[in-house]
Amino acid sequence: MDEITVSTPGKDDRNFAMLAHLLGIFTGFLGSLIIWLVKKDESPFVAQEAKEALNFQITMVIGGLIAYVLSFILIGLLLFPVLYILNIIFCILGAVAASKGQGYRYPFAIRLVN
């Protein structure tokens, strides 16, 4: 009988994946974009997590633009804090999962980068 071994990502890969999620709080999509561009050919785990974080941050930018347009009728003013809080919560959840070597999929994200 053949045994199937599942290799867990190394510590450096987990740290880069965690960083890709956390940088979204501070840099928007730029941090995860840079990590994805640098590490996409070196580590499949980091590439997948950075891509997921990048897609989520692009979704947050689109949500921010919609909130900006809607702020002229005062609805967007309520959306800005909601988007900000959701961004922090989901980025932290992604970072925790990545630090454990598990993949994280954001509950809502437009998957533009494949």
Image: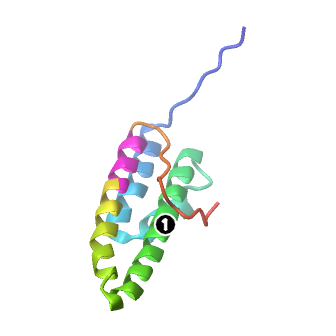
**Residue nearer the viewer, 94 or 37:** 94
Which residue is label 1 attached to?
A: 34
43 relative position to 71: left or right:
right
Question: Magenta span has 96?
Answer: yes
Kindly give the residue lying farthest to the top in the view shown: 1
Q: Position of residue 72 (x, y in %)?
A: 34, 91
Quadrant where the N terminus sits is top right
5 relative position to 35: left or right:
right
Q: Position of residue 105 (x, y in %)?
A: 50, 49
**Residue nearer the viewer, 74 or 26:** 74
Q: Residue at x 39, y 70 (%)?
A: 28
Q: Position of residue 100 (x, y in %)?
A: 40, 36
34 relative position to 43: left or right:
left
Dominant SS of magenta comes to helix
**Residue nearer the viewer, 98 or 105:** 105
Name the kind of residue labelled 1 in the image. Ile
Please tell me how crowded label 1 is: few (under 14), some (14-19), or many (20+) other residues with Cα within 10 Å: some
Residue 64, quarter of the rendered image: bottom left
Kindly give the residue lying farthest to the bottom in the view shown: 72
Residue 25, quarter of the rendered image: bottom left
Quadrant where the C terminus sits is bottom right
User: How many labels were placed on the picture?
Assistant: 1
Q: Position of residue 84 (x, y in %)?
A: 30, 68
Q: Residue at x 56, y 51 (%)?
A: 48
Give the magenta part as a residue range: 90-99
Question: Magenta span has 27?
Answer: no
Q: Is residue 99 above or below residue 29?
A: above
